[in-house]
Amino acid sequence: MNKKIIIPSLAIVFFSLAFFIAFSGISSGDEKIITGLVESRQVDVSSKIPGRLKKIFVREGDKVNIGDTLAIIESRELEAKLKQAKGALEAANAKYRMALNGARDEEKEAAMNLYLQAKSQYEYVSKTYNRFKELYKENVISLQEFDEIEFKYNAAKAQMEAAKAKYDMALKGAREEEISAARGLVTQAENAYNEVLAYYEELVIKSPISGEVTDIYADIGELINSGYPVFSILPENDRYVILHVREDEMQNISKGKIFKATIRALGNKELSVKVNYISPLGDFADWKPTNRKGDFDLKTFEVHLVPIDNNFKLLPGMTAQINLEN
């Protein structure tokens, strides 16, 4: 009965010791080996514009280069706004050209004809007015009759002057103030169009980096919101090894120092790695002292090491054994 209890207990102790040696570091003579993990940052690619996912051009595992098209989003509302802004810009340009070039020859001729017609009418009414004026002085006609012809005379004169002003405007073209105002409307319409166009171009989701597509979070036909991650990309040559080093083992570690890392997943190949980051503050305590007076917990520091040679095909999750004494 006691033997059955002892054997499992010994097995637990054995595996616990093996785990401690593998992941907490092992000292052998002048060697201090610590096991770390290969990590890499991941870039989430999202859409700036909400809409329906229309097309996807990549699959998980595909290699992409910076600027490659990943997907296209459909937004009918934005398409309508773009057409509206384009129409407003074309109208503003037409008004500006009209103000700049003046009236067309046909418009000038029409304005001249209206002026000549009004002038002829005025001359006819003017002669009648002068005759009635003499008749009124001689008391041949009444005051009411004279007032009527005087009213027609003044109306014909005002109509002729208005037609003359329109004809002169057609000949001279728009004033400088009107041209400046038309130019301002064009600038305003251009800015509005460019703003809508910038949003419209965001309907095409492009890769911001070169790397490998690891995840696709949406399917064709789904509605996605602004800022919603659609793809996750693993950058090229952005691998690094993370070590958690106890503070009493930090004496040989400094920024810029080079160590040898053994990668089990690559057939125990060795590669040179360089320390490029050391956490400024100690993290959790991974070693507890006994209850002896004066002892204290030992903190752990996170250390990042980057490969000097990027020819090795490191993948996140691979283990790397690093000898801190070499």
Image (cartoon, helix red, strand yellow):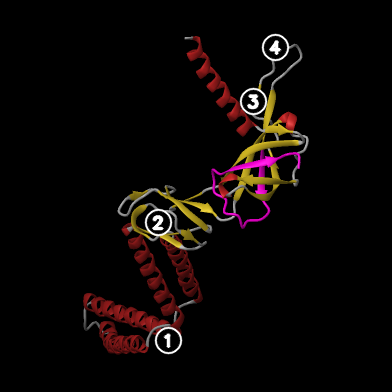
User: To which residue does mark 1 refer?
Assistant: 171
Q: Which amino acid does label 4 sit on?
A: Asn
Mark pair 3, 1: CA separation? 92 Å
Q: For residue 260, which numbered disc appears in the image?
A: none
Q: What stretch is highlighted in magenta?
A: 303-326
Q: What element carries label 2?
A: loop
Q: Is mark 3 on a helix, strand or loop?
A: strand
- 143 inside magenta stretch: no
Q: For residue 291, which numbered disc appears in the image?
A: 4
User: Quick one: label 1 or label 4, which is nearer the N terminus?
Assistant: 1
Along the line of sight, which residue is nearer the eye, 300 or 326?
326
- 313 inside magenta stretch: yes
Contact between labelled residues 4 and 1, with CB atoms less than 8 Å apart = no
Along the line of sight, which residue is nearer the eye, 223 or 276?
276
User: To which residue does mark 2 refer?
Assistant: 59
Is 93 rendered above or below residue 132? Answer: above
Q: What residue type is labelled 3?
A: Asp
Q: Looking at the picture, how far across and down is residue 234, in whole percent? A: 51, 51
The C terminus lies in quadrant: top right
Nearer mark to the viewer, of 3 and 1: 3
Q: What element carries label 4?
A: loop
